[in-house]
Image: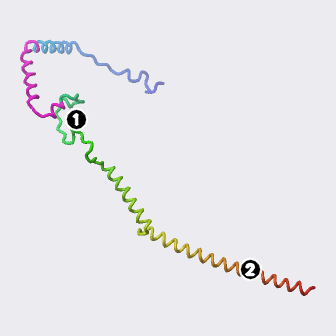
Amino acid sequence: MPKGGKKGGHKGRMRTYTSPEEIDAQMKAEKDRKKNEEEGGEGAAVNDNQKDDKVAGSGSEDSDDEISQKRKGVEGLIEIENPNRVAQKTKKVTDIELEGPKQLSRREREEIEKQKAKERYMKMHLAGKTDQAKADLARLAIIRKQREEAARKKEEERKVKEAAQAAVAAAKGLHTLSLK
């Protein structure tokens, strides 16, 4: 069974045909239009000249640029007034300023500010002026004290152990002497 579920699918739809009366009416309308164009050829030329005068008389450079550009969709049919649309203006090479200060975009400015703030923070952190640096130094001091105490205790235990071994050795020496 085909994918659509019915034999034949979409091809079995009802077809529409143009009636002979409609075809005759269309042909007649087309002949009338051609006849009007031939008779009113001079009048049509006058109308075209008037339209050209209106376009040329507008005087704005933007409208000339828009007319010369190929319009998309319904732009040619409907006059659109969009305040957000910026017409691209062509610049000459001589007008471009190469030595002037460059305007950075918002993202570039934010990135530079972020880097500068990070550098400032690192300088203050190394100097020990930030809260995190103070906390780190305090933690380090506590760890140093704990290590010193552990080293001192270890040294004391080692001394006690050596003294005990010396006492045991002395006691063994006395015990061996008495047997002889």
Taking 16 as reference, is 144 above or below it? below
The mark nearer the N terminus, 1 or 2, is 1
| Label 2: element kind | helix
| Residue 179 shown left or right of residue 125 in the figure | right
Residue underneath mark 1: 92
Q: Nearer the viewer, residue 66 or 168?
A: 168
- Seen at 17% across and 29% down, the residue is 67
Extreme-bottom residue of the structure: 178
Residue 31, horizontal then vertical, whole percent: 14, 12
Location of residue 169 by image quarter: bottom right
Q: Nearer the viewer, residue 174 or 59?
A: 174
Q: Is residue 166 magenta?
A: no
Q: Nearer the viewer, residue 96 or 83?
A: 96
Location of residue 88 by image quarter: top left
Q: Is residue 88 among the parts visible in the rendering?
A: no
For the residues labelled 1 and 2, the Cα–Cα distance comes to 94 Å
Report the span colored magenta.
Answer: 37-66
Amino acid on which disc 2 is placed: Glu
Local crowd at mark 1 within 10 Å, few (<14), some, or many (≥20)? few
Local crowd at mark 2 within 10 Å, few (<14), some, or many (≥20)? few
- Seen at 90% across and 87% down, the residue is 178
